């Protein structure tokens, strides 16, 4: 999917000083993940279920 027109979000925990961050964008069937320092680089695309499982596992 072309991610040119999706809205990217950075974690509210980001310090705003250009640190190591990921950005996430959502569409109805896909969650897109990219490096905030390389916005034109590749991005991962996963299902909402996969993303939810990942988030649950890192919050433990």
Image (cartoon, helix red, strand yellow):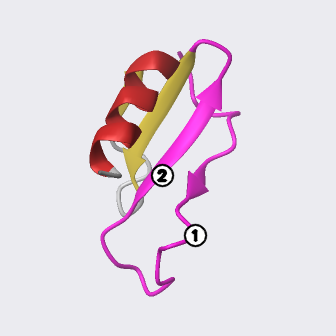
Say which quarter of the image contains residue 56.
top left
**Residue found 44% across the figure and 87% down from its top:** 17
* Residue closest to the eye, 38 or 12: 12
Where is residue 51? Give x, y as percent. 42, 29
Where is residue 23? Give x, y as percent. 48, 52
Q: Which residue is identified by label 2? A: 23
Characterize the local packing of mark 1: few (<14), some (14-19) or many (20 or more) Cα atoms within 10 angstroms: few
**Residue found 38% across the figure and 21% down from its top:** 50
Q: What element does badge 2 sit on?
A: strand
- Disc 2 from disc 1: Cα separation: 11 Å
Region rendered in magenta: 1-29
Q: Is residue 31 left or right of residue 50?
A: right
Q: Residue furthest front?
A: 60
Residue 30 in view: yes
Say which quarter of the image contains residue 34.
top left
Q: Earlier in the sequence, mark 2 or mark 1?
A: 1
Callout 2–callout 1 Cβ contact below 8 Å? no
| Number of dots carrying numbers | 2
**Residue found 59% across the figure and 12% down from its top:** 29
Q: Which residue is identified by label 1? A: 12
């Amino acid at each position: 999917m072309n991610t040119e027109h999706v809205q990217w979000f950075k974690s509210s925990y980001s310090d705003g000083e250009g640190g190591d961050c990921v950005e996430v964008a959502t569409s109805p069937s896909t969650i897109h993940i990219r490096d905030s320092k390389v916005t034109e680089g590749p991005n991962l695309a996963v299902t909402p279920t996969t993303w939810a499982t990942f988030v649950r596992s890192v919050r433990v």
